[in-house]
């Protein structure tokens, strides 16, 4: 069972521990509230059209074919607002949505319009206008804007072996990772097996035999190689540890996590299968935050975002390739939920971006700025200068958080 | 950032004879002659056409890849892309003053053993105290136990009760020094030589706490100073080193007819004598008999280590204890060795170092470790000749391997061993080498715990031993972990250009199409081009 994050597992990272002393003391715009913010990066590009299906769009079923969600049937989508339906793997999110504690932003993307994971993640996490900036992330710079408080365990928590870029930077950050070694996921194994099949038969045979033996002894999902269990279990574990730290009075108020595996080029599945299982893991993680944060869940916003979406059409391997517009999830007691925020672009060929991707109609940075403005209390001016530089034109979206 | 892919087999139009498949480079290649300016090669080729220039670039890449994988420990993220002739870079590394030495202030084996003696005594006293207390508490259970609890409860919580284990601390410091030397090396050939010889003359830290604290000093004192020196000198330093004398039990071997033997009824231990003949010098087929082993063991009696009391000299030092030495003339491998104490076994070692059987044994193992599990016979012959002709000059042997074209042209069929993989990964990704605890843990998971082989024959030097299903699974696990640790690594396109300049299209595609940086780094580390050498 899950143990409390051990003291040994906690480590200070980031150099300038006293940097905050030099920062202006902002009268906390968040007022008497004590907000919590969790940012989850979904690495690999989430297929928003199979996570949150536009069931009411006449082009959807034909375009997204076997990956499309359906309103009826054994794996029917969970109802949202009559137009959109939620992947059935996300039962907790659907419950929170019904309780008006969760919302979805659809057809959203950063300003990045190429299709490289590395660059796309850099733009999403750095908050800079283009790729190539990996010194600091927007969440760390937002942190630096906050008034310095005396928190024994630090103001922000980076979950993982190394802090995600979004939380790297000058402001000191607390690091925590589940004690287990990170385990290779099935996607990485499949990619490596493919490479070995093409280049090195001997290594291919050895690796396959090793993985096969591993699977035979790990039917319960726990094994020496995957001490943290499967992907779902690892997401849940990371969320549980983070929630436990954040629930404490002197614990961090901000956290960043990264979940891998969303690059579903092959056999993506729709309402069931690989993507659904990952969404189930994310759903478990959100529920774990809800439980673990307890009373402070009411002051919490969890944001789950991805670097870009996937193609609207299905490829030859029953998956989707790199695309543009995607869906983002917001959950938490402080979310003004129960709705899908979208300026729906449509799915006819002429509606699609470059005749292939869901056209982005909402700037994801406007969503993030909106949360930072209304939930954390940062001013529009600082957001446009320090946190997301050169984004004066991108106005924060109002009303995402309970006022 | 995409580079043109290296062509692995190239037809040379002006010569008309195709290079054999898998051959990266050939002396006949005009571009090679121009690039490498090898003496005696044709310099008429001018890199005029784009084709030739591209060919030359891809050949330089292939050549550097071989330098870094077959001879070295991988390219470093912090290094500028290499230029010039990689063979010269390796030679320059061999020519550096103090090559192979570590110049940090670590304790000598004498100091290390003194620490061990003190710690053992302390532990013994603590055990005695605990035994006494247990005896008392068994006699009067509850009140005494309660009384004992009080001081513990009243102990200041601010004073951390950190158990000080000087042996573990020393082992960690030695491990870190070794890792840092390997990570900092320009190409890494000299550190590969250190690892080769350290494994050839291995001791195991698992044998006891004394071996654990001596493993590092052993390598620094008996291996490093001689990796480019004389084999005979290394052999002499190794066999009289306290680590080896304890590891192969010679420290307690006593001549049955010596004064000590008659007094204590202790006797001969053949372990060291046998392993010197079988593993260190002649080889298992080197033509020695059981009688030779026993004779050698008798000659080695008295080679021991001064104990904590310091009766025979400074505690922890090597000493020849004449009192335990079996007197008499020894007859070994058809030669007779006079009864002159310490000099007797030394004379035997000198002859063993010079034996042609030793030359062939070493040359074969050397070529097998660096070039191929089944190295070309001609290469082994040439290396043997160098060893014998130079009277076991290991610098000459190491240079001969680099100079030999066969060592460069043999296809990369071997696998980096776990140590090489770990060091190459740290170098490529720029991961902080100071996280030594983690590095040590990784090595254990990969089946190669530092200085802790399963037996005196050391870790395997052949690829088949490492390319096992469980080995590959462990490698993937470690590559995954390292990929996530690599927060300061260059972006994957830059990294693959730097670390694997002649990577195949398939590997390039796998790395560049990875879903995240950590995944890209893991795939790069697991690629055949990174794993093979």
Image (cartoon, coloured by chain):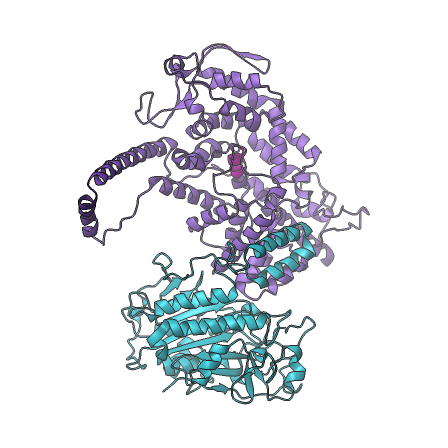
Chain colours: A cyan, B purple
Q: Assign the magenta stretch its main secondary structure.
A: helix
Q: Which residues are magenta?
A: B193-200
Determine whether B211 is above or below B333 in the image: below
Left or right: A398 with respect to B81? Answer: left
Which residue is situated farthest in the right direction here?
A: B16
Q: Nearer the viewer, residue A258 or B88?
A: A258
Left or right: A171 with respect to A91? Answer: left
Quarter of the N terminus of chain A within the rendering: bottom left
Q: Nearer the viewer, residue B191 or A58?
A: A58
Q: Position of residue B410 (x, y in %)?
A: 68, 42
Quadrant in the picture for residue A322: bottom right
Q: Position of residue A184 (x, y in %)?
A: 54, 59
Q: Position of residue A395 (x, y in %)?
A: 45, 85
Residue shown at the point (28%, 80%) measured from the top left: A27
Left or right: B39 with respect to B215? Answer: right
Is residue A53 a member of the stretch shown in magenta? Answer: no
């Amino acid at each position: 069972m899950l143990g409390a994050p051990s003291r040994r597992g906690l480590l200070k990272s980031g150099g300038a521990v006293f940097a905050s002393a030099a920062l202006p003391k902002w009268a906390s715009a968040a007022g008497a509230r004590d907000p919590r913010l969790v940012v989850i990066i979904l690495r690999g590009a989430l297929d928003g059209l199979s996570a949150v299906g536009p069931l009411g769009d006449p082009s959807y079923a034909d375009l997204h074919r076997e990956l499309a969600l359906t309103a009826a049937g054994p794996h029917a989508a969970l109802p949202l607002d009559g137009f959109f339906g939620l992947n059935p793997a996300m039962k907790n999110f659907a419950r929170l949505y019904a309780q008006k504690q969760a919302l979805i932003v659809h057809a959203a993307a950063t300003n990045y319009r190429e299709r490289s994971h590395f660059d796309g993640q850099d733009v999403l996490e750095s908050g800079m206008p283009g790729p190539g900036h990996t010194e600091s992330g927007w969440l760390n710079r937002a942190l630096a804007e906050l008034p310095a408080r005396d928190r024994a365990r630090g103001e922000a928590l980076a979950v993982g072996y190394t802090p995600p870029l979004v939380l790297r930077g000058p402001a000191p950050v607390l690091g925590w990772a589940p004690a287990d070694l990170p385990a290779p996921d099935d996607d990485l194994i499949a990619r490596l097996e493919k490479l070995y099949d093409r280049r090195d038969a001997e290594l291919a045979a050895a690796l396959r035999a090793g993985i096969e033996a591993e699977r035979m002894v790990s039917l319960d999902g726990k094994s020496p190689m995957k001490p943290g269990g499967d992907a779902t279990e690892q997401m849940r574990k990371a969320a549980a540890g983070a929630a436990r730290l954040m629930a404490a009075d002197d614990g961090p108020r901000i956290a960043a996590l990264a979940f891998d595996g969303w690059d579903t080029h092959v056999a993506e599945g729709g309402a069931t299968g690989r993507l659904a299982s990952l969404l189930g893991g994310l759903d478990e993680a959100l529920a774990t935050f809800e439980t673990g944060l307890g009373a402070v869940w009411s002051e919490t916003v969890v944001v789950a975002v991805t670097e870009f979406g996937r193609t609207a059409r299905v490829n030859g391997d029953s998956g989707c390739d790199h695309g543009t517009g995607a869906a983002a999830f917001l959950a938490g007691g402080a979310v003004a939920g129960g709705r899908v925020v979208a300026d729906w672009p449509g799915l006819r060929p002429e509606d699609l971006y470059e005749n292939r991707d869901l056209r982005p109609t909402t700037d994801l940075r406007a969503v993030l700025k909106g949360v930072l403005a209304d939930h954390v209390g940062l001013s529009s001016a600082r957001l446009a200068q320090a946190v997301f530089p050169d984004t004066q034109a991108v106005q924060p979206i109002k009303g995402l958080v309970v006022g | 950032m995409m580079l043109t892919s290296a062509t692995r087999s190239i037809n040379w139009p002006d010569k008309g004879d195709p290079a054999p498949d898998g051959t990266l480079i050939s002396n006949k290649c005009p571009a090679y002659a121009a690039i490498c300016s090898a003496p005696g090669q044709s310099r008429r080729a001018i890199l005029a056409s784009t084709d030739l220039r591209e060919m030359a670039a891809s050949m330089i890449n292939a050549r550097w890849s071989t330098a870094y994988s077959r001879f070295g420990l991988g390219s470093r993220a912090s290094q500028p892309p290499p230029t010039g002739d990689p063979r010269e870079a390796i030679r320059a590394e061999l020519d550096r003053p103090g090559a192979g030495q570590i110049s940090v202030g670590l304790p000598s084996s004498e100091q290390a053993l003194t620490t061990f003696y003190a710690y053992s005594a302390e532990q013994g006293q603590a055990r005695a105290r605990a035994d006494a207390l247990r005896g008392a508490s068994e006699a009067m259970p509850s009140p005494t136990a309660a009384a004992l609890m009080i001081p513990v409860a009243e102990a200041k919580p601010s004073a951390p009760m950190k158990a000080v284990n000087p042996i573990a601390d020393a082992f960690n410091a030695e491990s870190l020094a070794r890792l840092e030397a390997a990570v900092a090396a320009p190409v890494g050939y000299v550190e590969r030589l250190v690892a080769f010889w350290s494994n050839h003359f291995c001791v195991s830290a698992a044998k006891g706490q004394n071996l654990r604290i001596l493993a590092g000093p052993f390598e620094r004192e008996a291996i490093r100073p001689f990796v480019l020196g004389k084999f005979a000198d290394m052999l002499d330093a190794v066999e009289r080193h306290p680590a080896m004398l304890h590891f192969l039990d010679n420290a307690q071997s006593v001549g049955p007819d010596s004064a000590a033997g008659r007094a204590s009824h202790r006797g001969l231990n053949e372990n060291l004598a046998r392993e010197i003949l079988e593993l260190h010098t002649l080889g298992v087929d080197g033509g020695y008999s059981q009688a030779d082993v026993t004779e050698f063991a008798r000659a080695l009696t008295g080679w021991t280590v001064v104990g904590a009391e310091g009766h025979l000299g400074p505690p922890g030092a090597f000493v020849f204890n004449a009192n335990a030495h079996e007197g008499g003339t020894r007859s070994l491998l058809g030669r007779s060795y006079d009864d002159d104490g310490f000099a007797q076994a030394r004379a035997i070692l000198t002859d063993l170092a010079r034996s042609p059987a030793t030359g062939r044994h070493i040359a074969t193992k050397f070529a097998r470790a660096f070039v191929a599990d089944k190295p070309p016979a001609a290469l082994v012959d040439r290396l043997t000749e160098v060893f014998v002709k130079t009277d076991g000059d290991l610098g000459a042997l190491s240079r001969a391997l680099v100079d030999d074209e066969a060592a460069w042209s043999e296809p990369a069929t071997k696998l980096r061993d776990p140590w090489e993989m770990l060091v190459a990964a740290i170098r490529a990704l720029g991961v902080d080498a100071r996280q030594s605890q983690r590095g040590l843990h990784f090595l254990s998971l990969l089946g190669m715990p530092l200085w802790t082989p399963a037996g005196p024959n050391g870790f395997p030097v052949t690829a088949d031993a490492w390319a096992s299903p469980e080995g590959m699974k462990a490698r993937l696990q470690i590559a995954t972990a390292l990929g996530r640790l690599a927060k300061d690594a260059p972006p994957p396109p830059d990294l693959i250009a730097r670390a694997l300049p002649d990577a195949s299209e398939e590997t390039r595609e796998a790395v560049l199409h990875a879903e995240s940086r950590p995944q890209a780094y893991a795939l790069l580390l697991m690629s055949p081009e990174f794993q093979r050498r």
